[in-house]
């Protein structure tokens, strides 16, 4: 559960901004270490999503990775409270509304690209999502 800043109160994956001089994967490793106190190994990029928020003008590009190997146990930090869910019990109602569209592809190990435009109250105004062979 995201505890502060953007997305607060939603179940969300770990992540954040890429710092100057960092690759996307280096930022991923750093952010997960900061937010969960685990060290991930062999992350696999599985998706790229673009988000646009009409009200604020904010545009975000998210790179979605699947991680099956890590050392340590996820712990609660100032940023996030981790929790494991069974695949058939994923709490989509408490997540960003776009997750219900791309998460099934993620769970089937399908690579994907997409774009979501949000209006007031995080309502999806536009969506594009496609399965791809390569990212």
Image (cartoon, rainbow, N blue to C red):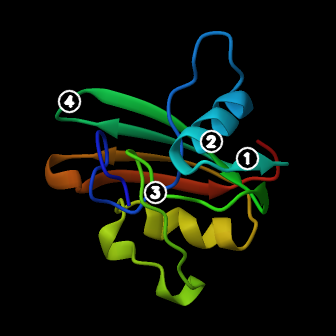
| Residue 25 locus on image (x, y percent) | 73, 33
Which residue sits at x=44%, y=57%?
12
| Element marked by disc 4 | loop
- In the image, residue 52 above or below residue 13: above
Circle on res. 39: 1
Q: CA distance from mark 1 to mark 3?
A: 15 Å
Point out the tag, 1 or 4, that comes first from the N-terminus.
Answer: 1
Point out the tag, 2 or 1, that comes first from the N-terminus.
Answer: 2
Camera sees residue 73: yes
Which residue sits at x=60%, y=48%?
37
Q: Are marks 2 and 1 in contact (CB under 8 Å)?
A: yes
Point out the tag, 1 or 3, that comes first from the N-terminus.
Answer: 1
Q: Are marks 1 and 4 in contact (CB under 8 Å)?
A: no
Circle on res. 76: 3
Point out the tag, 3 or 4, that comes first from the N-terminus.
Answer: 4
Point out the tag, 2 or 4, that comes first from the N-terminus.
Answer: 2
Which residue sits at x=54%, y=63%?
102
Quadrant of residue 6 within the rendered picture:
top left
- In the image, residue 89 above or below residue 37: below
Front label number (2 vs 4): 2
Please state if 112 lies on the left or on the right of 68 as rendered: left
Q: Which residue is mark 2?
A: 33
| Element marked by disc 1 | strand
| Element marked by disc 2 | helix
Circle on res. 56: 4
| Residue 112 locus on image (x, y percent) | 66, 54
| Residue 44 locus on image (x, y percent) | 79, 50
Q: CA distance from mark 3 to mark 4?
A: 29 Å
């Amino acid at each position: 559960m995201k505890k502060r800043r953007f997305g607060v109160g939603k179940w969300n994956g770990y992540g954040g901004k890429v710092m100057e001089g960092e690759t996307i994967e280096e930022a991923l490793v750093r952010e997960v270490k900061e937010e969960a106190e685990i060290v991930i190994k062999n992350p696999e990029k599985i998706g790229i999503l673009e988000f646009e928020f009409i009200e604020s003008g904010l545009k975000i590009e998210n790179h979605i990775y699947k991680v099956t190997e890590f050392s340590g146990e996820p712990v609660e930090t100032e940023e996030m409270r981790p929790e494991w869910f069974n695949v058939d019990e994923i709490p989509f109602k408490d997540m960003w509304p776009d997750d219900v569209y791309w998460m099934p592809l993620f769970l089937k190990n399908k690579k994907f690209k997409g774009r979501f435009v949000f209006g007031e109250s995080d309502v999806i105004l536009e969506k594009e999502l496609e399965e791809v062979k390569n990212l």
